[in-house]
Amino acid sequence: MDQNKQGEAAEGGNIGHPAHGKNQEEQSNPMIAPTNPPKKKSLEEQLNDFWAAQREEAKMTTNFKTHSLPLSRIKKIIKTDKDVKMISAETPVVFAKACEMFIKELTIRAWANTEARKGKILSQRDLVSAISQTASFDFLDDIMPKDAGLPRTSIASTENAYLNMPPQQNVAGLPYDAPTMAFPNLNHHAPN
C-alpha cells in the first residue's frame, strides 16, 4: 500500500493535487508573499478614490437611522449658536455625515504624512502638518497647538536628569494628619 502511494507520487506529483508547476502553488499558498506588491497610491489618488466611494455610498444609502456620531451631541453643538431656533430632523443626520467625511479626509491626509516620515503611528504632528498643508483646513489653525508640528527634543542628560523624573508616589513616611503622640521622639539628646 505504501509502495502504491509512492508510485503515484512519483508519476503524478503530489497526491490529490494536480502537478501544474510552482506558480499555481505560490498563488494558492497565502503564506507566500506576492513578488510584485501593489503600487502605493499618491495622496491625490487616495483622495479621489475616497470621494468617489463617498459619492457612491451617498447614492446607495437608504438607511438613515445608523450613525457613527451621536445625533444628540450634534444637536447640542448646533444649538450653541444663538441664532438657531429650531432644528429640522434631517439636519443632524446630514451634519453627522459631513463630520464623518471630514474626519476621514483629515485622517487620510495625516496618514500620508505618517507614511512620508516612515512612521507607523499617526501622531499629532501628522495632523498639524495635514492641516497646515490644506487650505480648506485653515480654520483649524487657531485650535491646533503651534509646537505640535515640531519634533520634541529631550533635555535629559546626566546633569539635569532629575527634570524628567516622575513625581514620587507612595513614599513611606508619616502621614500629614498623623498625631505626634503616636510617634515617640527617638532623639534623646534633642531639647524638649
Image (cartoon, rainbow, N blue to C red):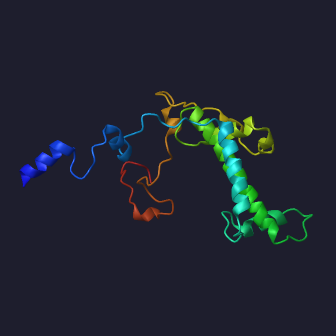
Seen from the viewer's position, the closer of residues 106 and 164 is: 106
Give the residue at the far right of this rendering. 83
Q: Is residue 84 above or below residue 143?
A: below
Give the residue at the far front of this rendering. 11
Report x, y in % for residue 44. 69, 37
Seen from the viewer's position, the closer of residues 158 and 99 is: 99
Report x, y in % for residue 103. 69, 51
Seen from the viewer's position, the closer of residues 96 and 128 is: 96
Seen from the viewer's position, the closer of residues 186 and 72 is: 72
x 72%, y 51%: residue: 102
Q: Is residue 76 visible?
A: no
x 69%, y 72%: residue: 65
Q: Is residue 21 above or below residue 158?
A: below
Q: Answer left or right for 129 relative to 178.
A: right
Residue 26's quadrant in the figure?
top left
Residue 172's quadrant in the figure?
bottom left
Q: Answer left or right for 108 relative to 176.
A: right
x 73%, y 68%: residue: 71
Report x, y in % for residue 60. 70, 62
Q: Answer left or right for 33 relative to 136.
A: left
Q: Answer left or right for 150 relative to 3.
A: right
Report x, y in % for residue 46. 65, 41
Where, quadrant-wise, is the N terminus in this rendering? bottom left
Where, quadrant-wise, is the C terminus in this rendering? bottom left
Residue 99's quadrant in the figure?
bottom right
Q: Is residue 11 visible?
A: yes
